[in-house]
Amino acid sequence: MLSIGALRAHLVAARLAGVVATSREESLRSYRLFAARDPRVLIGIDPQGAWGQRELVALMADKCGVSGDPLRVDGHDVIDPGRTLAGLDAFAARIGDVAQRSGPVLIGTGHPHRLLGFYVALADALSAAGCAVLTPAQGRCVDITTRFGLRTYNLDYVRGVALVREPGRPSSGCETGAHTHSPLPVRTALAAAAEAGGPLPELVIGDHGWVCGAGQLGFEAIGLADTDDPALFVGEAEGAVSVVVPLDDAVRSDYYRPLTRYVLNRACLSQ
């Protein structure tokens, strides 16, 4: 495992933190849409506070380390690697806690092309620790509104990690799926688990709507989020989401491997 200093250097070199690919324009657009309560950006969170754009900029500056200047409107966003490391520590602590009591978990991603390997490693380690890694509603259809209109996807699992696929795409041995921010997949999975009489997850792990949708329903949820995903950080600020790790969620998949090793080691789940 990398030392703290080496991991910090890796975060910056891989642009997981430090100067990231997400532009200030992208983030500000998300903040404006969130302030307008656009469901595409709320991704399952029902905010209690009056979150205007200025309040969101201040929150994201505190949680991520982006510029707190509301007049800064261009360039690339910056994530403080210290905040990423602190988030990884808190993330690992929650995983370690559920592993100690062998609690059931649900893991899902809207970024399968980038983050599937990260989550699969967590699923494998938690399963080895005696946790039930839940796979409810496998194969169930989920209708999601996209920029191209309403699209039907199938809920699938790869080694215990949920994702959605376009109908007709092969699932056996195929580790790709569709990118989505929607909370509908996690709502579908949780409803199916409840209808079947459980078990229900003690912890939901993921990103995008998987975290926000579960957290809004009262499940403990932890995950990863970029600077243009304010919903997770608002959820954390309001108590609906337990832990959010600020980082770029769309770099090369192998760049997340040192983070995987760090989290598993901190959670006492190293294999």
Image (cartoon, rainbow, N blue to C red):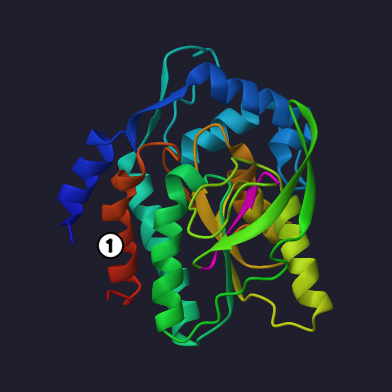
Please state the extent of the stretch shown in magenta in the rendering.
160-167
Q: Looking at the image, can residue 243 be seen?
A: no
- In this rendering, position of residue 29 left or right of residue 244: right
- In this rendering, position of residue 145 left or right of residue 127: right
Tell me the SS state at disc 1. Answer: helix
User: From what the image shows, is residue 161 above or below residue 47?
Assistant: below
Residue 270 in the image, given as x and y percentages of width and height: 28, 74
Quadrant of the image occupied by residue 271: bottom left
Query: Residue at horizontal 59%, vertical 21%?
Result: 28
Q: Which residue is mark 1?
A: 261
Count of numbered tags: 1
Give whichever of 263, 169 is nearer the camera: 169
Quadrant of the image occupied by residue 66: top left
- In this rendering, position of residue 201 left or right of residue 251: right
Give whichever of 166, 218 is nearer the camera: 166
Quadrant of the image occupied by residue 248: top left
Q: Is residue 91 magenta?
A: no
- In this rendering, position of residue 196 left or right of residue 182: right
User: From what the image shows, is residue 93 above or below residue 87?
Assistant: below
Query: Residue at horizontal 15%, vertical 49%?
Result: 6
Residue 38 in the image, given as x and y percentages of width and height: 78, 31
Q: Looking at the image, can residue 156 be seen?
A: yes
Give whichever of 202, 181 is nearer the camera: 181
Label 1 is placed on what type of residue? Arg
Query: Residue at horizontal 41%, vertical 70%?
Result: 93
